[in-house]
Amino acid sequence: MTRIGQALMLLHGGDREEARNRFGLLWQQIGPDGDPLHRCTLAHYMADTQDDPDTELAWDLRALSAAEDLTDERLAAHDASAAVRALYPSLHLNLAADYVKLHRPDAARAHLDRARAAADHLDDDGYGNGVRAAIERLELRLRAE
């Protein structure tokens, strides 16, 4: 998780290419059958480094798949206050945004509906409110299109 965080700092600092390279090396080490927490986290952020919407979608789908393998116990070992169900709003929101980019509004709406339904599990804090606001922004964008 530390090395994922270091690569994430590169991404947030604007160095998408180096972040993508580091995430790629980490993915090779973790592998598709590695720790679900590592796979979910890495795939979630790797998607954000992609230039191609199809590739971004593939990484977001990997993140969702890894989340389905993740247990609350494993997540709690990393963050005692976290629950797996709180990951789903963001994961589905990202998938909805991917489908918008790919001009697939029906798939986007389906994932947006899942994100909204899962948002009930978010806390009333900065993260939860930010995800809920992003859901609403994407909903408005879909309505406009």
Image: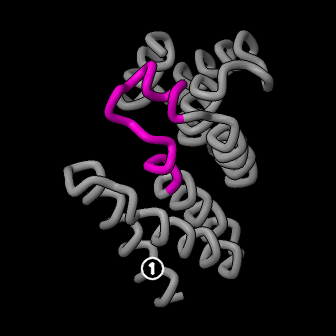
- Direction left: furthest residue: 125
Q: 32 or 21: nearer the eye? A: 32
Is residue 130 found inside the magenta-colored segment of the image? no
Q: In this view, does 129 lie to the left or right of 132?
A: left
Report x, y in % for residue 71.
59, 34
What is the crowding at mark 1: few (fewer than 14 residues within 10 Å), some, or many (at least 20)? Answer: some
Name which residue lies at 38% across and 36% down: 82
Report x, y in % for residue 144.
47, 89
Judging by the rendered image, the residue that carries numbered circle 1 is 139
Residue 35, relative to residue 114: is it above or below? above
Report x, y in % for residue 72.
51, 35
Name which residue lies at 49% across and 11% down: 3
Identify the image quadrant of the C terminus: bottom right
Task: Point out the stretch of residues depicted in magenta.
Answer: 72-88
Name which residue lies at 48% across and 89% down: 143
Picture quadrant of residue 10: top left
Picture quadrant of residue 36: top right
Residue 73, relative to residue 27: is it above or below? below
Name which residue lies at 60% across and 78% down: 109
Q: 75 or 134: nearer the eye? A: 75
Q: How many labels does the image show?
A: 1
- Direction front: furthest residue: 73
Picture quadrant of residue 122: bottom left
Disc 1 residue type? Glu
Q: Is residue 133 left or right of residue 63?
A: left
Q: Main secondary structure of the magenta part?
A: helix
Residue 67, relative to residue 12: is it above or below? below
